[in-house]
Image (cartoon, rainbow, N blue to C red):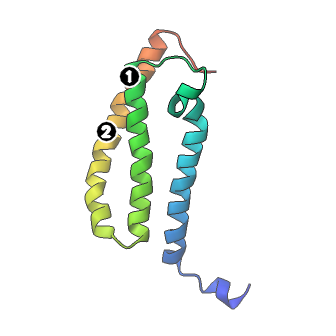
Amino acid sequence: MTEQALNINPRSADRIFFPAIALFAAFIVIVGFGPSYYFKEFTDARELRLSVHLHGLVFSAWIILFIVQAFLVRTGNVSFHRKLGVFGVAIAALLVVVGTTVFTARAQTHFYPP
C-alpha cells in the first residue's frame, strides 16, 4: 500500500461515507417507491389509503432526517445534530406506530404486496 493510503484519517472517511450512504438510501427509496407513491400521478398506480399516506410521510421524514443529520456532522455542526436527534426519537416512535397500524390494516384485508 502507498504511504498516503495508510494515513487516512477515519474521521475524514466517515465524513464522506455517511452522507454518501444517506443519499444512496434516499435514491433506493425513490426508485423503489417512486412509481407507486412519489410519482403515482404519472403511473397507473392505485389509490392509497390515508394511513398509507401517513406511513409514507413519516418514513420519508426519517430518510430526510438521516440525510440532514449526516450532512450536519460533515459540516461540523455537531451541536445542532444532537439537538435534532431529539426530533429523531419522536420520528422513530411514529415509525413504530404507523408501521404497525398499516401492517395490521393490510393483514386484515389479506393484502400482501407481490
Q: Residue furthest front?
A: 42
Mark 2: few/some/many CA within 10 Å (<14, 14-19, 20+): few
Q: Work out whether mark 2 precedes mark 1 in sequence or the reverse, and give the earlier one.
A: 1
Q: Which residue is mark 1?
A: 51
Seen in the picture, residue 2 relative to 67 is either above or below; the reply is: below
Say which amino acid is labelled 2: Ala
Say which amino acid is labelled 1: Ser
Any part of residue 8 in sight: yes
SS for tag 1? helix
Seen in the picture, residue 24 relative to 34 is either above or below; the reply is: below
User: Residue 12 versus residue 37: which sits nearer the camera?
Assistant: 37
**Left or right placement of residue 114 versus residue 89 in this view:** right
Tell me which residue sits at (43%, 53%) in the image: 66
Q: Quadrant of residue 83?
A: bottom left
Seen in the picture, residue 28 relative to 17 is either above or below; the reply is: above
Camera-near label (2 vs 1) is: 1
SS for tag 2? helix
Q: Residue furthest bottom?
A: 3
Mark 1: few/some/many CA within 10 Å (<14, 14-19, 20+): some
Q: Quadrant of residue 21?
A: bottom right
Tell me which residue sits at (58%, 28%) in the image: 42
Q: Quadrant of the C terminus?
A: top right
Tell me which residue sits at (54%, 32%) in the image: 39
Q: Residue furthest right?
A: 1
Tell me which residue sits at (48%, 15%) in the image: 107
Percent of width and height locating residue 106 = 47, 16
Percent of width and height locating residue 34 = 57, 35
Any part of residue 99 in sight: no
Check residue 72 in the rendering and tell me which mark sits there, or answer none: none
Q: Which residue is mark 2?
A: 93
Percent of width and height locating residue 108 = 45, 10
